[in-house]
Image: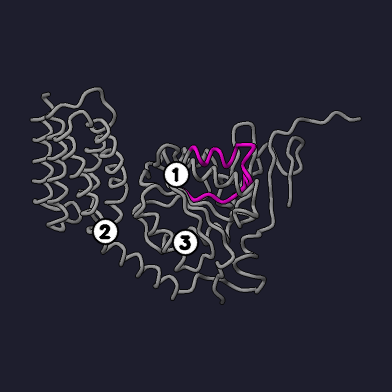
Amino acid sequence: MAEKKPVIVRFYRFKNRLKEKTAGLAPGKVTISPEALEAAEEALHKMAEDYPDWVSGLIVKLQEQHGRCVDTPEKRRDCFEEINRIAHDMKGQGGTFGYPLITTVSDSLYGFTQSREEISDNQVELVKAHLDAMRAVIRGRVSGSGGDIGQKLIEGLNQAILKYSKK
Amino acid sequence: MSDYDFDRLNVLLAEDSPFIRSLLVNSLKVLGVGNVYAVEHGGDAIHFLQRVKNEPMRVGVQQIDIVISNWDMHPVDGMMFLRWVRRHKDSPDRFVPFMMITSYTEPERVLQAREMGVTEMLAKPFTIKNIGEKLISIIERPRQFVHTKDFFGPDRRRQKLDHDGPERRVLTDKSEGVEIIRG
């Protein structure tokens, strides 16, 4: 038997089953129907309108966790875990719906609520500073980078971070 | 000219944000996608695909046609999920088109996903038009899969450029060491 050379590269070329499945066998150009696109775009906008309400709901949840941190210091670590989870959820989509400031603030909140040994009163205060900033963004419907107001909000938050991070 | 009929499509969606998840499910449904299976992260997605492989009757789906996954998820992110789909022996379909959603659009991140065998990248924030374009690209312009000692995935060359110099590529379809598998 002749010695077979080792394979260096393998190419897989398959029939386009996905095309058969979605476009059938009819010849000619296939498109996504403009009506469907429009309907989907509309549905997306409608959901985007609901975004501030949805965020408000999450802020309420964060507030509850903050309250628990104050009332039951021994449960702080659990609360921080939950806060961290919610912050992660929020930071992913602020930008998608025109609220990049929500992403900025929740990213910061997410960063400092990651697992840590001990949680000081100052750190709990810092959670509150973040919640205040988020609430201000949503209440004022501060979309985009928020111009001067956005700038002030972020500056305020940064000052709070400086103040409270000195243990 | 006719319209696509996505009614028979089975899409697996892995997205950890409930808001984005319902938004994507909704958008795909309005575009006419017949079945969207939504899970919360890469681990759930892997589990789902294993079930599709092992007990398709119970899951009610024989084959997933397109995977759409967020990148940044916990505990199993989109890249780990993609790696599993492309390389793991339990993967039911190592060739399935994989669309990665990400807000990381730095070139090195895109490159990283490409090296792992991603089919399309969908950048956040996205529009319906973006999703539609990616779907069309997956359906109309599938690429051959390339398997070498350090790569497995859709061909990273998307374009066929004309070239008027001599052919200097070392390997052609007829070379020894090149194996072509059709199906």
Q: Secondary structure at mark 1?
A: loop
State which tag comes first along the sequence, 1 or 3: 1
Residue A75 pos. (x, y %): 23, 31
Please determine whether, in this image, residue A113 is positioned above or below residue B73. above
Q: Quadrant of residue A74?
A: top left
In screen coordinates, is A92 left or right of A22? Answer: left
Looking at the picture, how far across and down is residue B45, in whole percent?
A: 51, 45
Q: Which element carries disc 3, helix, strand or loop?
A: helix
Q: Which residue is mark 1?
A: B41
The amino acid type of the residue labelled 1 equals His
At x 56%, y 46%, the residue is B157
Which chain does tag 1 point to? B
Q: Chain of mark 2?
A: A
Q: Which residues are magenta?
A: B80-100
Q: Amino acid at mark 3?
A: Glu
Q: Identify the residue shown where x is 35% and y is 46%.
A: B103
From the viewer's perspective, is the residue at label 2 or at label 3 nearer?
A: 2
Count neighbours of disc 1 (C-alpha within 10 A) and say few if under 14, some if 14 to 19, many if 20 or more. many
Task: Please identify the quarter of the rendering in which residue B106 is found.
Answer: top left
Measure the C-alpha gap from mark 2 to mark 3: 25 Å
Q: Is A82 or B19 nearer to us in this picture?
A: A82
Instruction: State the residue position of label 2.
Output: A51
Q: Nearer the viewer's eye, disc 1 or disc 3? A: 1
| Tag of residue B133 | 3
